[in-house]
Amino acid sequence: MEKRHSLELTSIGIIHSPCKDRGEAPPQGYRSGKISHIEVFKEFEEGLKDTEGFSHLVVIFWFHKSQGYSLLTRTPWDDTPRGLFATRSPYRPCPLGVTVVKLISREKNILKVKGLDALDGTPLLDIKPYISSIDEKAVIKRGWLEGKLSR
């Protein structure tokens, strides 16, 4: 039985990125050496305590410029139409973005990060520490991407 929920999300900050439009954003943030600044709103600044002890963070954001979607989509890695949920396309029914970034520094409510694939002005939804012993999996299958990525 299908049951859908309407959700209300509250942004906790804003992303300041050198990428102003979709054409400037890399297909995946880890391939980019670009530096972004994550501004966490002042009322949430205390929640950043201890983040500077982590080398990497998981950043969850809203693809605010995403419009529409198709359940079959093409990717930068090949021309075969793939199921949307087997891709990382920003055009989704619920356009959430999730990226692991390298934390360069923290100054008060600003995080300086590398490897973020969000556009300038993107609403920030959450930040979590990347913990390799929890997040990294030793045995993985890459599905249709096998042999298409360098790592």
Image (cartoon, helix red, strand yellow):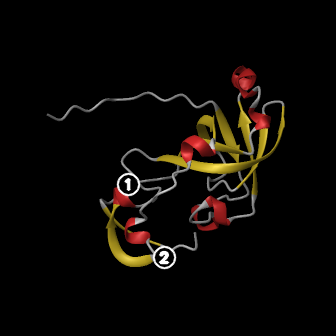
Q: Look at the picture and state if 52 lies above or below 119.
A: above
127 sits left or right of 33 in the view: left
| Residue that label 2 marks | 148
37 left or right, relative to 65 = right
Q: Amino acid at mark 2?
A: Lys
Could you classify mark 1 by the number of other residues whose Cα lies within 10 Å: few (under 14), some (14-19), or many (20 or more)? few
Helix or strand or loop: what does disc 2 sit on?
loop
Q: On the image, numbered disc 1 is attached to which residue?
A: 68
Q: Position of residue 91 (x, y in %)?
A: 43, 56
Question: SS for tag 1?
Answer: loop
Asked if residue 122 can be seen in this view, the reply is no
Which one is nearer the viewer's eye here, 149 or 22? 149
Q: Position of residue 1 (x, y in %)?
A: 14, 34
Residue appearing at x 59%, y 50% in the figure:
99
Image quadrant assignment for residue 10:
top right
Identity of the residue drawn at 42% across and 78% down: 78
Residue 8 drawn above or below residue 91? above
In this view, 17 is above or below 42: below
Whether pointer 1 and pointer 2 mark residues with C-beta atoms closer than 8 Å, the reply is no
Whichever of callouts 1 and 2 sits on the residue coming sooner in the sequence is 1
Q: Is residue 15 visible?
A: yes
Where does the image place residue 72, in percent across and percent down from the top left?
30, 64
Label 1 vs label 2, nearer the camera: 2
Q: Residue at x 62, y 63 (%)?
A: 25
- State which quarter of the image contains the C terminus: bottom right
Q: Depth check: give the residue in front, 111 or 62.
A: 111
Q: Is residue 151 above or below residue 16?
A: below
Residue 41: name its quadrant. Answer: top right
